[in-house]
Image (spheres, helix red, strand yellow):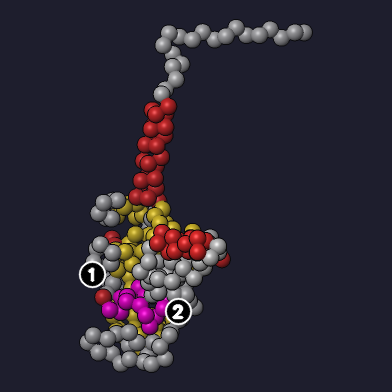
Amino acid sequence: MALKKSPPAANPKGGGRKKPFWQEYGEALVIALVLALVIRAFLVQAFSIPSGSMQPTLLIGDYLLVNKFIYGIRNPFSNKMWIPISSPRRGDIVVFIFPQDPSKDYIKRVIGLPGDTVQIINKKVYLNGRQVETPQAVYTDPSVIPATPNQHRDNFGPVTVPPDSFFVMGDNRDQSYDSRFWGFVSMDALRGKAFVIYFSWQGQGQPGMALYQAFAKGASGLLHGWHWDRQSFRVRWDRIGRLIN
């Protein structure tokens, strides 16, 4: 049996009018921009590592993603908590607003939770009277510095972590400016938890050189020697996609 073709659907007057090219792409661009802002404000934000205080876990030139939703929904302007979801655990690597300069963000590992008593004796960390070890921690200076009013690197405390606050330290223990020197991180200062490295590079001039500058210097080798200048810019392919813990 032959199939009959359906008659073309009636096109109502003025209906089906195609939008101008610029309007279609303009609307798509606005929607994409709004989605990106929402994702950055509430879900995931990108950060880069400019110093070696978290080595070897995080290296200068690592670019990472931070889960902003994991601890709660926050006001994107003031960072104040709106809806709490969870609290940081010992060992979490967190990004936070630096208490001494709110224009800067720091990244450290959570060591002490609210109510914990923290003490450091000759580089060894004690929580509530028991020694704890962080497998990722490294010590590059064999000397032990006695505690003084201005020096708490190797001998510190004991102190009790206040409510809604955390004691944080860098994995590069002898080269980290952390809670031993400037105090606790409040819950309201937390940005989120770092969870993956999405890009990483190294080259001469780190940490002062910007990514685009180092890339340009690497590419200049193609003009002068017909080869990429790996000393100026090299991608660490083995670190891309690495989970942070």
The residue carrying mark 2 is 137
Q: Which mark is residue 69?
A: none
- Residue 214 image point, x, y percent: 43, 64
Nearest the eye: 204 or 46: 204
The amino acid beneath tag 1 is Gln
Query: At 29% from the left edge and 51% from the top edge, which residue is drawn?
Result: 76
Q: Any magenta on residue 172?
A: yes
Q: Secondary structure at mark 1?
A: loop
Q: On the rendered image, what quadrant is the N terminus found in?
A: top right
Answer whether residue 235 is visible to the viewer in this image: no
Q: Which residues are magenta?
A: 168-181
The tag on residue 100 is 1
In front here: 194 or 103?
A: 103
Res 52 visible: yes
Q: How many marks?
A: 2
Q: What x and y, as percent, mark residue 39? A: 39, 47
Quarter of the view holding residue 123: bottom left
Tell me what residue is drawn at x 49 percent, y 78 percent.
Answer: 135
Label 2 Cα crowd, 10 Å radius (few <14 / some 14-19 / many 20+): some
* Type of the residue with mark 2: Ala
> How would you rate the neighbour count of disc 1 (Cα within 10 Å): few for under 14, some for 14-19, many for 20 or more?
few
